[in-house]
Image (tube, helix red, strand yellow):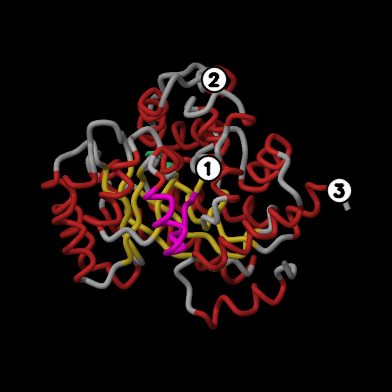
């Protein structure tokens, strides 16, 4: 069996996936036409050509512009359904999807429109593809705390459909501490908590995410190696880290895959997972992330099986839901 086939066959959970980041240029143009939303690019090809990012912010500027074509419930359905079909090809058995309500409500799209479309796709994925999923509402950290609280209020009638909260967008200069109060409220409401930390920001932001937000998983977290005491803590607690290697290359967190710290993190005993982040923008869905990481860093099949098993263990499902996947997961 070749490596790509081996990777696809591993039962895996995708735990770091922004649904808005699965908007392929073809769909962006189709939805733009459907909704009469003009795009800043002349064609699908010109759009792809613009995906040469310098850093996180240069990506986010384009990502938020693209998301403007998402207007109606069926747009969110089409987006998520396309993702689930693509994820099924990669052997994804479970996905925990981030969504950014503020990106949509700021344009007048009702919160419920976003949620209804995503949920309808999730129900179809469950039925037709056997993929389970959860929704994680992300607060945009470049906006003030008051915006996060207002978003939580809009989410309140829908909390039965939302499993957790996260923190994303521009990291540098926006420490987790700014969102400690809103995360405390979310945890009181019974929501799981995760946060992007240590992608471009320092290791101290990871510590803040754990201590001040109560983050149960750290999204990215690749800069943890700058703080040995933090690494020891993450290893001791087996805190999952949702690493996104192709994203890190596209956003120039590391110059090449050979420079990526993923293998060092795995060898340090951290519960690392591999995810695709924004696959329409970063050149690969989850199986390609596994493959390129394996090829670039010399990961063995046993390493890859460990990473896939980590993703199953790190997901927010019940032990009952997890058990059949673990049975299908290779012995280590
Ligand atoms: N990689 C990333 N980091 C922060 N915010 C994001 N929003 C979408 N992708 C992101
Ligand atoms: Zn992300």
Q: Which mark is residue 2?
A: 3
Dot 1 falls on a residue whose secondary structure is loop
Q: Please tell me which of labels 2 and 1 falls first in the chain.
A: 2
What is the distance, in whole Å, between disc 2 and disc 1 at their CAs? 28 Å
Q: Are marks 2 and 1 in contact (CB under 8 Å)?
A: no
What is the distance, in whole Å, between disc 2 and disc 3 at their CAs? 36 Å
Q: Please tell me which of labels 2 and 3 falls first in the chain.
A: 3
* Residue for badge 1: 244
Using residue 145 as the reference point, say whether residue 82 is left or right of it. right
Residue 133 lies, with reference to residue 5, above or below; the image says: below
Q: Nearer the viewer, residue 183 or 58?
A: 183
Using residue 261 as the reference point, say whether residue 236 is left or right of it. left
Image quarter in which the C terminus is found = bottom right
Q: Please tell me which of labels 3 and 1 falls first in the chain.
A: 3
Q: Nearer the viewer, residue 21 or 114?
A: 21
Q: Are marks 3 and 1 in contact (CB under 8 Å)?
A: no
Residue found at x 55% / y 78%: 321
* Residue for badge 2: 43
Whether the residue under disc 1 has CB within 8 Å of ligand 2: yes
**Residue extent of the magenta highlight:** 229-242
Hey, which residue is sitting farthest left in the picture? 146
Dot 2 falls on a residue whose secondary structure is loop
Q: Residue 175 location, x and y as percent?
A: 23, 40
Residue found at x 45% / y 37%: 34
Q: Nearer the viewer, residue 82 or 246?
A: 246
């Amino acid at each position: 069996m070749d490596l790509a086939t081996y990777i696809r066959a591993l039962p895996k959970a995708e735990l770091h996936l922004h649904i808005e980041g699965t908007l392929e240029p073809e769909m962006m143009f189709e939805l733009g036409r459907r909704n009469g939303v003009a795009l800043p690019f002349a064609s699908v090809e010109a759009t792809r050509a613009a995906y040469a990012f310098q850093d996180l912010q240069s990506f986010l500027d384009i990502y938020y512009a693209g998301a403007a074509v998402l207007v109606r419930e069926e747009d969110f359905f089409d987006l998520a359904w396309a993702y689930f079909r693509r994820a099924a090809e990669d052997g994804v058995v479970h996905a925990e999807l981030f969504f950014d309500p503020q990106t949509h409500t700021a344009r007048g799209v009702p919160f419920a429109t976003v949620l209804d479309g995503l949920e309808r796709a999730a129900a179809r994925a469950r039925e037709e593809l056997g993929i389970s999923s959860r929704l994680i509402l992300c607060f945009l950290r470049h906006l003030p705390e008051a915006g996060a609280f207002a978003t939580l209020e809009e989410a309140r009638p829908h909390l039965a459909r939302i499993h957790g909260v996260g923190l994303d967008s521009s990291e540098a200069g926006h420490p987790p501490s700014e969102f400690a109060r809103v995360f405390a409220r979310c945890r009181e409401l019974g929501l799981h908590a995760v946060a992007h930390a240590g992608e471009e920001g320092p290791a101290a932001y990871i510590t803040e995410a754990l201590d001040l937000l109560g983050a149960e998983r750290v999204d990215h977290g690749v800069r943890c190696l700058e703080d040995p005491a933090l690494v020891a803590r993450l290893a001791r607690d087996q805190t999952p880290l949702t690493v996104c290697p192709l994203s890190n290359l596209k956003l120039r967190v590391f110059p090449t895959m050979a420079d990526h710290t993923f293998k060092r993190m795995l060898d340090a005993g951290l519960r690392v997972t591999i995810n695709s982040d924004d696959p329409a923008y970063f050149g690969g869905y989850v199986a390609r992330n596994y493959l390129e990481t394996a090829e670039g860093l010399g990961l063995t099949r046993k390493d890859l099986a460990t990473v896939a098993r980590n993703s199953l263990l790190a997901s927010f499902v019940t032990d009952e839901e997890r058990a059949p996947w673990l049975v299908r997961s290779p012995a280590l």
